[in-house]
Image: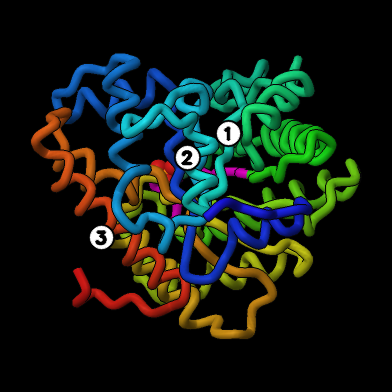
Amino acid sequence: MGLDLQTLNDVANWMAASGKGILAADESTPTIGKRFDQIGAESTEKSRNAYRDLLFSSNGIEQYISGVILFDETLRQFSLDGGTPYPDYLSNLGIIPGIKVDKGAKPLAGFPGETITEGLDGLRDRLEEYRNLGARFAKWRAVIKIGEDMPSFSSIATNAHALARYAALCQEADLVPIVEPEILMDGEHTVEDSFEVTELVLESVFSELYSQGVVLEEMILKPNMVLSGYECEDQADVDTVAGMTLDCLKRTVPAAVPGIAFLSGGQSDELATAHLSAMNKMAGDGKPWNLTFSYGRALQQPALKAWEGKDENISAAQEAFMKRAKLNGLASVGKYSEDME
Ligand code: 13P
């Protein structure tokens, strides 16, 4: 099956389709290197190709995955079964190919410990090339930290401004922007702190998107969930996280946005699934946007562990990957339960 999606709104709706979600497989070369180190595998162009191929060729992946975010290198690589460029390979399965376009979070001058995401210079030309190579959407991740005197007004304002500039350029280039303002969950902050900062950041992001003429119907929001800091003694339970995240999103995300696809941000894979399912169950049909996943680690961790960089483990790794994809697909319609693990 090929994909026949005419407008950016069609693409955004497909990305947020019910029962499915997005696989974030766009780790930069240094980041995937760290993941490979953890399983004792060497990171080379060939091994990265083999690993991404293992994920994309998992039997039935298209039942649960609506889109895949690729890194530049993978977008230009070919499937191992017959040399099809990955954007075509995925489209043939009915999965939308996308591309990470930011150049990473760099130190923000004057604000030690905070970052601004770079990559706007020359972005128009890069987007044109990516669209020609078959990408239909893009991703840009901004990173906000909670800590002593953090986040500063500056880090929120500069990152929101950059996200909106990126999103406007994407729509001009016929690409759906995934707008990702990630508030890190590292630290001792409480779930209430997380709520307050998430609300402030999302308000600021949507204000910039509005100022810069970004069409809300043609984008996907990729936020963090409202969670207790990982080092906070008092960890909010699943229902609290689900309820507070929903409340925060209802206050800040306009109904015109077709879909919200969460990042997992270092949560365990089981918790990331449980939180998503609880939100969908709680909100029922009374929410204006589809709520789904755009997980990296929470989808890939068990597969990486099973693979260990060895050919003989490919089937086991695919099985582990498909299990998480399926359970998250169920979570995206509120139908996951712990006993399915
Ligand atoms: P995690 O789900 O591992 O947080 O990754 C999602 C992502 O794409 C971060 O930009």
Q: Say which amino acid is labelled 2.
A: Tyr
Task: Please identify, in this view, whether the residue under mark 1 or under mark 2 is nearer the observer.
Answer: 2
| Above/below status of 151 relative to 273 | above
Instruction: Name which residue lies at 82% across and 46% down.
Output: 209
Q: Position of residue 159 (x, y in %)?
A: 70, 34
**To which residue does mark 1 refer?**
99
Q: What is the crowding at mark 2: few (fewer than 14 residues within 10 Å), some, or many (at least 20)?
A: many
32 lies left or right of 129: left
Q: Say which amino acid is labelled 1.
A: Ile
Say how many tags the image has.
3
| Above/below status of 287 relative to 180 | below
**To which residue does mark 3 refer?**
323
Task: Tell me which segment is drawn in magenta.
Answer: 180-190
Q: Nearer the viewer, residue 225 or 298?
A: 298
Q: CA distance from mark 3 to mark 1?
A: 25 Å
In the picture, the disc for residue 89 is: 2
The reply to whether the C-beta atoms of the residues labelled 3 and 2 are less than 8 Å apart is no
